[in-house]
């Protein structure tokens, strides 16, 4: 009896294994590509920007410049400046401007991370109001010699209705 049950189980397994699987093909529409609104350069290579967001409080203006069109953002630049420095060229080699007090630069992508503590050592950053919104000019070189640059003059989306 046990042998008969074993043979029936093996026969059933073989029958199931030989059954042809029907593949179902589904037509998927390709996503409409989102046109970049700007670009930034890192190590001489240009990257498209799809998100530009501005946030303000009483003391600071902060900008998020991201490659992705929506969160979660994995490749981005964050620029922040004290409002009293709007319109001034902040020279990173001039130590009268204090990193994380007067300004802040953060850069992150899948291969690099420069937190706010790791300030650029050379270059300049100028943020000023313009007729279209804000004008940003960044030309930064980090201690390891890698360069980050960004230039944009226009409108920014507002963060949380600011």
Image: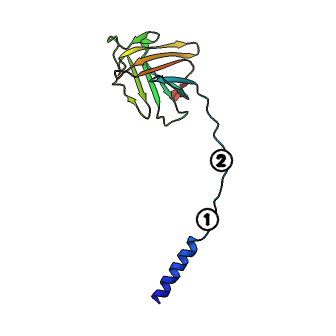
Residue 63 picture location, percent across and down: 48, 23
In terms of depth relative to the viewer, which is nearer, 69 or 7? 7
Mark toward the start of the polypeptide (1 vs 2) = 1
Residue 81 picture location, percent across and down: 42, 17
Q: Quadrant of residue 12?
A: bottom right
Q: Is residue 28 left or right of residue 78?
A: right
Disc 2 crowd rating (10 Å Cα; few below 14, some 14-19, many 20+) is: few
Q: Is residue 40 visible?
A: yes
* Residue located 44% across and 16% down the image: 139
Residue 149 picture location, percent across and down: 47, 19
Q: Is residue 162 visible?
A: no
- Count the marks: how many? 2
Q: Which numbered disc covers residue 35? A: none
Q: Is residue 113 left or right of residue 127?
A: left
Q: Which numbered disc covers residue 28? A: 2
Relative to 119, is 27 above or below?
Answer: below
* Residue located 40% across and 31% down the image: 112
- CA separation, marks 1 and 2? 21 Å
Residue, far left = 95
Q: Which residue is mark 1?
A: 21
Q: Quadrant of residue 105?
A: top left
Label 2: which secondary element: loop
Q: Quadrant of residue 90?
A: top left
């Amino acid at each position: 009896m046990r042998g008969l049950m074993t043979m029936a189980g093996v026969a059933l397994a073989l029958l199931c294994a030989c059954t042809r699987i029907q593949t179902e093909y589904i037509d998927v529409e390709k996503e409409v590509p989102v046109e970049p609104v700007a670009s930034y350069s890192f190590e001489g290579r240009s990257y498209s920007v799809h998100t530009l967001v501005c946030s303000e409080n009483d003391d600071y203006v902060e900008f998020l410049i991201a490659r992705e069109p929506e969160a979660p953002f994995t490749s981005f630049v964050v620029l922040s400046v004290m409002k009293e420095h709007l319109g001034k060229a902040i020279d990173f080699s001039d130590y009268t401007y204090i990193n994380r007090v007067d300004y802040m630069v953060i850069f992150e992508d899948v291969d690099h991370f420069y937190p706010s503590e790791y300030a650029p050592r050379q270059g300049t950053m100028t943020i000023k109001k313009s007729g279209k919104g804000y004008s940003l000019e960044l030309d930064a070189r980090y201690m390891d010699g890698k360069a980050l640059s960004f230039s944009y003059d226009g409108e920014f989306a507002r963060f949380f209705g600011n």
